């Protein structure tokens, strides 16, 4: 307690001798959320309040030596792959615009290749397997794809179409977040944001409940849907309906990623947003001293900020907020990503040959299954690179059973995304009724690169509109501006 008082007095004295920065924005975290806040702050303040800009300086703090956060790559046996966030949906319009704006190259990930075979493993046998086309001839591949569609229809019937329309409705509602400022308000809470787009109700029930309501068969829910939620969120169909719809949308067609790594979106946005980037600088405390936030870092430095944006999940962090803030407790789901260069062991799956193992092994909910999925990232001449997702670490003994040979293995333990529930409880976007904002409050709805960007865009508008109300930037009204933000997007 005494130490805290001394620290506050010290910060106060420091402020007396340094210029206050009421229009300095400090962003904690350099992932897609933090980078998007910086980008939209610059874009919108330049477009709507060119001079003087309401935002003088943007400081960004990143505890690691690289930007991008959960968008990161891993290099195994000399080749680089996505280690965290890997796929984008064709309707992820912020990501699409970032890619154009930053002149990045699109790539179709291997996992979305239609010719890849899929198998559903229950821990003892494959309960369902699609045909595998070894031929490179397009006609043969098309025939195999048709046969797979027929086989899937025979197993799951019309429930497949009901699943598609469930996803389509959610995706179409989500598209409202790209509407212009004339029709789209600035949202002060996650609940308000979700209700406006007709998505809130989906966070009050589990995916399983929502899909039963939508008329899906129990078999489809227990098999294909479960496989998808386990791959995308490492969780069962007990996640909320909205997180589930996002997860299912991430298994459709047209998925893409960025050549060289998705992290380049964050790097490019930061580069182009006139940001003062502080790498290797972890923020330890945030103290509000009346009209300024003082951020203290592990480098022993202090920064004065008029606005502070938290662009990282707070759940496993030890940032000391003064005064204290209150957010609903949230557990993060850890996903262990294990990258292996080698060959799977057919005997582990009760098969005779390696070629009988599907390219993507999805798994059912069962104590007998040690992983959520195994996918091939690349086929090499004599072996492959695989990615294994699991809820627990894959021990070497287990890996020696699952694989017949392993040349190199890399294990990453991700504090990956929230452990979803229904009904979900949301932290506030504005943590203290002043200018302390929390982008990742939206992550309780769903966790993706695009949802982070969408939440960040709203936070940027919220900051600018609240600054305009509080510090007299009278002409800056982001609720009723004439120019449509979609124009800005096409310019990007
Ligand atoms: C294994 C895995 C697979 C995924 N797959 C996909 C996918 O295919 N598609 C998709 O869209 N999404 C996917 N996601 C989710 C996606 O990665 C996240 O939703 C998104 O990247 C979150 O971005 P963010 O900027 O909000 O947070 P983060 O990317 O976590 O960024 C936060 C940053 O803040 C930094 N930080 C934390 N504390 C401090 C501090 N005190 N001081 C300074 N810096 C700090 C962190 O180091 C980090 O760089 C996946 C995630 C994981 C883990």
Image (tube, rainbow, N blue to C red):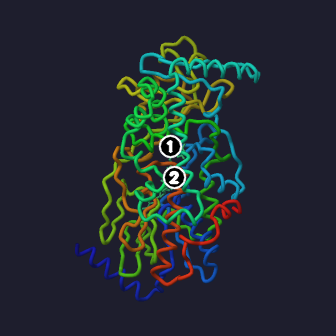
User: CB of residue at label 1: within 8 Å of ligand 1?
Assistant: no
Q: What residue is drawn where x is 37% and y is 37%? A: 238
Relative to 73, does residue 384 appear above or below in the rendering?
above
Give residue 386's position: percent from left, percent from top: 56, 31
Residue 451 bears which disc, if any? 2
Locate residue 195: give its quadrant.
bottom left
Residue 210 is at least partly visible in this image: yes
Near-viewer residue (50 or 1): 50
Q: Does residue 223 sit above or below 320 in this rendering?
A: above
Horizontal and vertical percent position of residue 397: 42, 26
Element type at marker 1?
Answer: helix
Mark 2 and mark 1 lie on one chain; the one further toward the N terminus is 1
In the picture of the structure, the residue carrying the numbered disc 1 is 246
196 relative to 399, above or below = below
| On-image quarter of the C terminus | bottom right
485 left or right, relative to 372 = right
Q: Nearer the viewer, residue 347 or 191?
A: 191
Seen as rendered, the residue at the extreme left is 1
Give the alpha-carbon distance from disc 2 to disc 1, as whole Å.
10 Å
Residue 221 in picture, x, y percent from top left: 43, 28
- Badge 1, how many Cα within 10 Å: few under 14, some, many 20+? many
Q: Secondary structure at mark 2?
A: helix
Marks 1 and 2: in contact by CB < 8 Å? yes
């Amino acid at each position: 307690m005494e130490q805290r008082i001394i620290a506050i007095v010290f910060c106060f004295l420091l402020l007396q001798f340094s210029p206050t920065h009421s229009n300095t924005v400090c962003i904690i975290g350099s992932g897609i959320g933090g980078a998007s806040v910086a980008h939209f702050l610059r874009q919108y303040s330049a477009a709507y309040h060119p001079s003087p800009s309401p935002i003088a300086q943007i400081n960004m703090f990143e505890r690691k030596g690289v930007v991008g956060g959960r968008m990161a790559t891993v290099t195994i046996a000399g080749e680089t792959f996505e280690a965290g966030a890997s796929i984008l949906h064709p309707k992820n319009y912020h990501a699409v615009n970032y890619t154009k704006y930053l002149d990045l190259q699109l790539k179709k990930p291997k996992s979305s290749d239609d010719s890849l075979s899929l198998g559903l493993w229950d821990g003892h046998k494959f309960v369902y397997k699609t045909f595998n086309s070894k031929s490179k001839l397009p006609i043969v591949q098309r025939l195999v794809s048709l046969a797979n569609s027929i086989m899937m229809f025979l197993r799951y019937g019309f429930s497949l179409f009901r699943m598609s329309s469930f996803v389509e409705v959610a995706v179409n509602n989500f598209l409202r977040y790209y509407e212009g400022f004339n029709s789209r308000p600035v949202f002060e809470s996650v609940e308000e944001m979700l209700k406006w787009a007709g998505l809130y109700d989906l966070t009050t029930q589990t995916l399983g409940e929502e899909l039963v309501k939508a008329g899906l068969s129990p078999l489809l829910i227990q098999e294909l849907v479960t496989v998808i939620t386990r791959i995308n969120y490492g969780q069962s169909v007990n996640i909320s309906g909205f997180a589930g719809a996002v997860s299912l949308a991430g298994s459709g067609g047209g998925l893409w990623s960025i050549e060289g790594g998705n992290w380049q979106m964050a790097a490019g946005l930061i580069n182009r947003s006139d940001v003062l980037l502080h790498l290797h600088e972890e923020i330890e405390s945030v103290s509000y001293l009346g009209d300024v936030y003082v951020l203290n870092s592990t480098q022993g430095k202090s920064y004065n900020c008029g606005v502070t944006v938290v662009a990282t999940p707070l759940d496993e962090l030890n940032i000391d907020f003064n005064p204290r803030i209150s957010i609903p407790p949230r557990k993060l789901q850890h996903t262990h990503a294990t990258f292996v260069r080698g060959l799977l062991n057919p005997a582990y799956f009760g098969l005779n040959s390696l070629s009988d193992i599907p390219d993507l092994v999805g798994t059912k909910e069962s104590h007998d299954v040690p992983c959520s999925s195994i996918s091939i990232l690349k086929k090499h001449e004599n072996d492959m690179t695989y990615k294994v997702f699991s809820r627990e670490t894959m021990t070497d003994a287990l890996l020696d059973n699952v694989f017949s040979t392993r040349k190199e293995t890399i294990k990453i333990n991700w504090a990956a995304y929230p452990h979803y529930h229904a009904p979900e409880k949301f932290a506030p976007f504005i943590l203290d009724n002043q200018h302390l904002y929390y982008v990742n409050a939206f992550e309780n709805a769903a966790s993706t690169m695009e949802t982070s960007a969408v939440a960040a865009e709203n936070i940027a508008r919220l900051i600018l509109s609240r600054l305009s109300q509080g510090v007299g930037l009278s002409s800056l009204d982001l609720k009723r501006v004439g120019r449509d933000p979609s124009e800005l997007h096409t310019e990007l």
